[in-house]
Image (cartoon, helix red, strand yellow):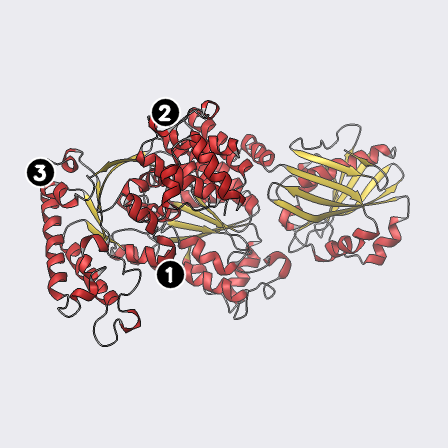
Amino acid sequence: MKLSTQTQANARDAFVAAKQNGDTYRAIHAARELLHGEGGVRQMSFLVRELETATNWRVPLNSLKVALLSSFSIEFAQPALVAYGFLNGLDIRIYRGGFGQFRQEIIDPSSGLYACAPDVVVLAVEGSDWIPALYGQFLEYWEMGFEALIEQTCEETSGLLRKLRSRSSAAVLVHNLAPPVSRQAGILDGQKQIGQAQWVHRLNEGLAAVCRQTESAYVVDYAGVVARFGVERWYDERMRMYARAPIAADQLPHLAVEYLKYFRALRGLAKKCVVVDLDNTLWGGVLGEDGLHGIQLGSEYPGSAFVAFQKELLNLHRRGVLLAIASKNNSADVEEVFAQNKNMVLERKHFASLQIHWKPKSESIMAIAQELNIGLEHIVFVDDNPVECEEISQALPMLSVICLSGQPERYSHALLQDGLFDSLTISSEDLRRGELYKQRDQAEALRADSDSLEQFYRSLEMEVTITPVEKASLARAAQLTQKTNQFNATTFRYTEADLSARICKTDWLLATVSVRDRFGDTGIVGFMMAQANGKKLNIDSFLLSCRVIGRTVETAMLAYLCDQATRQGLNELTGRIIPTAKNSPVRELYGQHGFNKSSETESGESFWKLALEDHRVAWPDWIKICVTDSARPRP
Amino acid sequence: MEQKIKQIMADVLNLDAQSIDEATVKDHTESWDSLNHINLVMAFEQEFQVSFDVTEIESMLSYSDILEVLDRKVQN
């Protein structure tokens, strides 16, 4: 997926600005935007060059010296390695062995390999270079068999690893071999005798055994990587011939990402905790709106996709990864789901921490990090809402944020594809649940205080349109009154006829609210209805879809009502809160906007008022407001 | 298209895009070594969604050459 040039230009500027300020995490964020999708040669060249001259990162990068020994021109993979290394907080310095001289570099004690004292040595040898007999010359050797050749190759590898280990304590990553692109014997291959691919598998088993015998030597499943992306796309025969660079330019980032799994694990940077949202993440739909049995979870799509995702999370839990929840919901509702929804795969006990409330999610995550005693940089945050993801990315830039989009059947892939949780050691502790880790000293957490919250709101580039209800919006307005439960002050349910009757009355004011932001257009998501009585404007209904809670849209709505009241010569705005099981988010609405509580009943209903001469609700200045009368739009 | 070619060359070869013109040739540009030549080719392929054959790769030795080859390619 290619980004538009405009977005790429923005990402570049953002990167350069962050680099100048030494702001490591913002630079990483911008770099990730820039490389998003293809990670093209052009953008990587730019990035790598910029990184060379970056000297004042406030949060220092983790330095890693990598030696690349190869049978082909692996230099083309270097920019990807450096770029993706940076995305993981690593400063990767590369030593490249002479072309095709991987044996010499290892055997010769005075080689550049040992002189550069690498942390990691990568042995990237293509099967066709190492054992041409198994590849291009297969049919010549077919009759003779390949046992001897395989044994010889394993012996050679073993010897090389021993020599390497005797002179260096660097971790060693050994590519296994990808099967040949096509079978020389065609469909006959493997039928009557062991086939070409099967011999390569045997060799790979031998290589794995050899690596097991050497301390800190690991197999890179190159065969698996090539298979995953497709051998047809992986190789570029033209470049193989012309530049001895067999791997297609588009695929090089995949190789880099694979290496990064190892580098992260070796540097202790593997992620240790997943924080998940609930609505449209663990199940389809919104619990507060759809109810315990209305959420999508079960044997039919899309419920089945969410079940599959829960199973993957359970697998992570079994691997020793901590699970936590950060969700804007009523905790009572969530408890009900765990207790009563039979389709849930995950149980309450699988979660090491639950933060279920209406405060910003950045606060939830900080609370989780503190409770579980792990560093924020070890946390992966997973949510389907791009606005939440953006809030977290800005407030806590050291987190890995996975923004799930659209199709739940792709969630597992999004979570697992970069191997964020991969480690190279398995202890029995890892396999047990609920392991806690010590927090790292350096914490660069920005508190979600009012300054950064405002910055965040501004970054959303919100446009709010408030329009009097008319025939075209009548159905949607009525629907909102019937369906909205959480951010609904009075929860009065109205039909189209009810609303229609009030539209033409001059003492009634009915308006819909739509929101557009950087991520898209939500359509009509809010509704307000008020009646003038004497000098007062009494708010009968005030509601917002849960999709747009927590973004000060309600402030704009109240500012609108203040304006409308003043225009009509009224001097007081009154509101009413009728508490229900579901509307905790709206309880403090009027209090937070400067209204005074005038009374409260036994059942908990509260009445509020605002004297407009003393105090008005100000328009939030980070929102672009568009107020229309039916006749004249007025910005 | 000229602008885009110059910007790509600027990124890959570490040149100033404004200074790229008919005088910009591989032989006289220090950063335009064989490694970067391949990188340049790969970048053009990605950015213009085209594929060059080896003959074309070998013929793209200056800004003017590149312009000519891409012009032909992108029209087809």
Percent across and percent down for residue A249 are 37, 45
Q: Position of residue A144 (x, y in %)?
A: 12, 68
Q: Eyeballing the image, is A241 above or below A343?
A: above
Q: Residues within 10 Å of mark 2 (few under 14, many from 20)?
A: few
Q: Tell me the SS state at disc 3.
A: loop
Q: Residue at x 34, y 49 (%)?
A: A238
Residue A10 coordinates in the image, percent (x, y): 52, 33
Which kind of residue does numbered mark 1 sit on? Asn
Name the residue tied to disc 2.
A56
**Residue type at numbered disc 3:** Pro
How many residues crowd mark 3 within 10 Å: few (<14), some (14–19), many (20+)? some
Q: CA distance from mark 1 to mark 3?
A: 45 Å
Disc 1: which residue: A315
Q: Label 2 amino acid?
A: Asn
- At x 64% / y 32%, what residue is drawn? A622
Asked whether A173 or A522 is in front, the reply is A173
- Give whichever of discs 1 and 3 has the lower sequence position: 3
Q: What is the spatial separation of the Cα atoms under label 2 and label 3, in whole angstroms?
A: 36 Å
Q: Nearer the viewer, mark 1 or mark 2?
A: 2
> Closest to the observer: A605 or A158?
A158
* Residue A109: mark in rendering: 3
Label 2 with label 3: CB-CB less than 8 Å = no
Foreground mark, 2 or 3, reads 3
In the image, taking residue A115 as reference, residue A76 lies left or right, namely right
Q: Earlier in the sequence, mark 1 or mark 2?
A: 2
Chain letter of the residue carrying label 3 = A
Q: Position of residue A315 (x, y in %)?
A: 37, 61
